[in-house]
Image (cartoon, grey):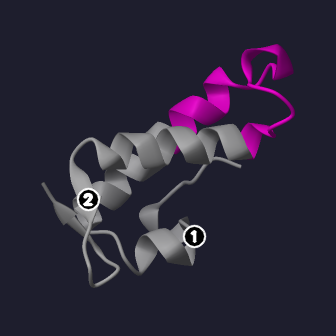
């Protein structure tokens, strides 16, 4: 289920991640969604969606970190 807009992202992303990081998340998720369509490309028994979310969070973590306030901030 690729995301068409950042407004479609999960609440945990929309409510705590800056807009630029939301854009990174969306693009990384959508790319991974396509890249991991084949079950053989994924690790263990994880679903296509789980794999895409992991990739998306990893992409966000390259430029942002979670603060003590629970929100994500640029590094």
Locate residue 29, reporting x and y percent.
53, 43
Q: Nearer the viewer, mark 2 or mark 1?
A: 2
Whether pointer 2 and pointer 1 mark residues with C-beta atoms closer than 8 Å, the reply is no
Locate residue 49, reporting x and y percent.
72, 45
* Residue beneath the point at 51% across and 74% down: 12
Q: Is residue 41 left or right of residue 56?
A: right
| Image height of 11 relative to 75, above or below | below
User: Is 38 part of what is drawn in magenta?
Assistant: yes
List the single residue furthest toward the bottom.
69
Locate residue 32, reporting x and y percent.
58, 31
Q: Which residue is mark 2?
A: 65
Name the one closer to the observer, 73 or 19.
73
What label does residue 10 carry, if any?
A: 1
Q: Please state the extent of the stretch shown in magenta in the rendering.
A: 29-49
Q: Is residue 33 left or right of residue 12?
A: right
Point out the image quarter for the C terminus. Answer: bottom left
Locate residue 20, reporting x and y percent.
24, 58
Q: How many other residues sit within 10 Å of disc 2, few (<14), some (14-19) or many (≥20)?
A: some
User: Is 40 part of what is drawn in magenta?
Assistant: yes
Res 66 → quadrant: bottom left
Q: Is residue 71 left or right of residue 48?
A: left
Q: Secondary structure at mark 1?
A: loop
Which of pointers 2 and 1 lies earlier in the amino acid sequence? 1
Name the one closer to the observer, 12 or 24.
12
The answer for how far apart the CA atoms under marks 2 and 1 are is 18 Å
């Amino acid at each position: 289920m690729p995301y068409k807009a950042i407004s479609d992202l999960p609440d945990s992303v929309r409510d705590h991640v800056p807009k630029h990081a939301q854009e990174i998340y969306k693009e990384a998720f959508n790319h991974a969604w396509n890249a991991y369509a084949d079950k053989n490309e994924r690790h263990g028994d994880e679903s296509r969606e789980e794999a895409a979310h992991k990739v998306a969070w990893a992409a966000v973590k390259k430029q942002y970190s979670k603060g003590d306030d629970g929100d994500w901030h640029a590094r």
